[in-house]
Amino acid sequence: MLNDLRYALRMLMKAPAFTVIAIFALALGIGANTAIFSVVNAVLLRPLPYPEPDRLVMVREKTSTFPNGSVSYPNFLDWRAGQRSFTDLTLTRRESYNFSPIGGAGTPERVGGGRVTFNFLAVFGLKPLMGRDFVEKDDVPGAAPVALISERLWKSKFGASANILGQKVMVDGIAREIIAVLPDDLRFPRLAEIWVPLADLRKEEGVLRRGNHPGFSVVGRLKPGVTLQQANADLDTIAAELERLYPDSNSTRRVRMDLLLESAVGEYRDSLRLLLGAVGCVLLIACANVANLQLARALARGKELAVRAALGASRWQLMRQMLTESVLLGIFGALAGVVLAVWSLDAILALSPSRVARFQETRIDLAALFFTGAVALGSGVLVGLWPAWRVSKNAALAVALHEDGARGGSGGVRQHRARSALVVTQVALAVVLLAGAGLTLKSFWRAQQEPINFNPSNLLTVNLALPQARYDKDEKTIAFYTQLLERVRALPGVESAAIGANIPFDDSSWDSTFHITGTPELPPAQEPSAEINIVSADYFRAMGMPIIRGRAFGPEEVFGRPRSIIIDETLAQKFFPGVDPIGRNINDNQTLVENPPPTTIVGVVARTRNEAPGEANIESLKFYQIYFCSAQYAARGNSLIVRVKAGDPLALVPAIKRQIETLDPEQPLGTVATMEKNIGASLATRRLTMSLLAAFAGLALVLASVGIYGVMALSTTQRTRELGIRFALGASRGDVLRLVLGRGILLIGIGLATGLLGAFAASRALNSLLYGVGAFDAAALLGALVILAAVAFVACYLPARRASLVDPIEALRAE
């Protein structure tokens, strides 16, 4: 084997053009596979960093209309008390907190966090790096306020101080004692840096209402031997009993369970599998290219191999020599491919959803390198197996040994068929990739063009959340935002400013059932639902949303008076057909007051799109929209919306921050972004799929065209004497051009037809990822065929034209 290896290296060095082209082609295919596998490994394959992560389950509630809803606190208590399938269940909710160390060390800032029950760490099977876990007495109303912090926060804000335990920090206006530092392995809830117990939430009236679902999720650890299906049936039995006991709040409510990893990244599974299949096609095209080159080179070396056979080399030894060269090419291609993969990862991560930490954890690790090595070996064998088998046949060796050198290298009919089959394969795979890229490109364009019914240009959003500890009265909250809006509107360059809770593309949702006053009560679980928005008077002006009917909120909306609402056009058309909804009433169920007066409709606006279309989110449910006025309904958490007259909206952030600090020095800013950036982030998954598929389709197009050109050029060279004879017998240059070009067009046509069938099959797998585009979209498929046919025609025409210019005297001189 060492002799074979040394000889293979010498032979590759003697043919530098072939070696460089082959390594480059394989590097493109292997590098693309390495990069995408690294993403797939990080997102889908790498287990969660918890003990026995396959036993951790996310539990949510579902209804006949809402497949993935939050959990009612009383329902959680009943589940936990009655279940038999889990070691325990913990209740969690993703939060963000105003955080600052006590003592003036650092400015206030907004950090991610979580509300959790005391058994949270026990369910995840983790222990603190230092300090103690929550205990049950920490998680009761009136308990001493405590908190757990992440290792990241400990290092970044406290310099990894060994004296961190017992220190106090301000968390939403409450001084909390740090009792533990948690390892970086814990990434739940998403982006959490601080965890606090439920504690006082357990006595809040809104939480204690069984019909209220205030954003909670449940995580459970399955008992050994219990399956997900058994656990689901267990909790569904409890849910059915709760429906019997509490039909008003629990009608049709059942349980949805997913493995914790699946709940976090399941929505990306189809996209990543598609990309992995796409890079597999690119690799096959690259291998077909190199196999064609290798076969041509092996045929040119026919006499050498025949002499080796005559001197006693067995067929296996000859095959082994050829395979050694191919595997070496695969290894060199893999080394170059890893470099390409490392370079491409930054671009892939820039396109990936930023809110999913596992995408950002993508790296070329040991698993990716093992995968690359396996792909390299497989590619080497795939590239070299057919050429090695063909040239090592006894008949081929005998012909090569007795053939005159001037006539050698034609390769025979079977070799022509083999090369032709490889060309057809390349063209077919390229068609599949181009069609897929065309479908996803059109789908992305359709998603971008879906009306949002507001103007996102020049719009800045700043998230704010006032802590309940300091803003315990609605009047305080309303006063803060009123003063802030006055100050922001006075800033140079500001056209309008408003606040809103649950605004479009803010990564949150708030829905509720509603009832038209004076109409018959519907049975439980059959009431219509709407998204609830709380906005200030200037909201619709700032968002660029015209009032279709009625008026916007104004001075008439005063705290303490019956509430006014604005509804969207779809609600008006459905529940007030043919009549003016202005002045009509909807029951006010967004209050804890008993028997409140109904709300009055004062305006109608267009329905806005709040999330990316065509995905499994609340947008897909097409809920109606109801707007409350912030002057009557105080919400501590809001987005400040600022429309600037011109320029970059982000340039206004320092001035806004100064105005907030003037009103409340302890109030930090949350997420700051332009509306256009938020909309773009919602389409990140589609953009990633489209961009990478387009890139892979481009690679496939280049590799396929190079492969076609190579085969046609080689075929033309081998037919030089034949073409000379044809010229001598009277054939015109046009005849020869049509003869050579006709063979190439035949191969392209077969490849296009085969690829079209493959594209039909592949488009069905794409169907779940498309929006506004059918799986058999004629324009996308036709575009793929036309593009590839045009490029392939050029690749065929160049060798055909060169063949038509052959000098018959030169061609026949060797005879």
Image: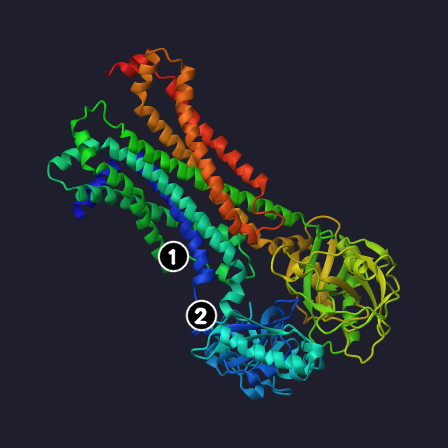
- Label 2 crowding class (10 Å Cα cut-off): few <14, some 14-19, many 20+? few
Can residue 489 be seen here? The reply is no
Which quadrant of the figure contains the C terminus? top left
In the rendered image, the vertical position of residue 708 relative to residue 451, given as above or below: above
What's the residue type where badge 1 is placed? Ala
- Residue 528 lies, in percent from the top left, at 74, 67
Look at mark 2 in the image and give the residue it sits on. 49
What amino acid type is highlighted by mark number 2? Pro
User: So how many labels did they put on this image?
Assistant: 2
Give the mark nearest the N terminus, 1 or 2: 2
Residue closer to the observer: 136 or 738: 738
The answer to whether residue 785 shows anywhere in this view is: yes
Q: Looking at this rendering, what residue extends furthest in the left direction?
A: 311
The x, y position of residue 199, in whole percent, is 62, 83
**Residue topped by disc 1:** 368
Q: Dividing the picture into quarters, in which one does residue 42 lie?
A: bottom left
The local secondary structure at tag 2 comes to: loop
Question: What is the crowding at mark 1: few (fewer than 14 residues within 10 Å), some, or many (at least 20)?
Answer: many
Secondary structure, mark 1, is helix
Q: CA distance from mark 1 to mark 2?
A: 18 Å
- Residue at 44%, 42% (x, y): give it: 429
Location of residue 657 (image quadrant): bottom right
**Residue 211, percent across and down?**
69, 77
In the rendered view, does 145 fall on the left or right side of 268? Answer: right
In the image, which disc is placed on residue 794? none
- Residue 808 is left or right of residue 3, and the answer is right
Q: Is residue 617 above or below residue 288?
A: below
Quadrant of residue 78 in the image?
bottom right
**Labelled pair 1, 2 in contact (Cβ < 8 Å):** no
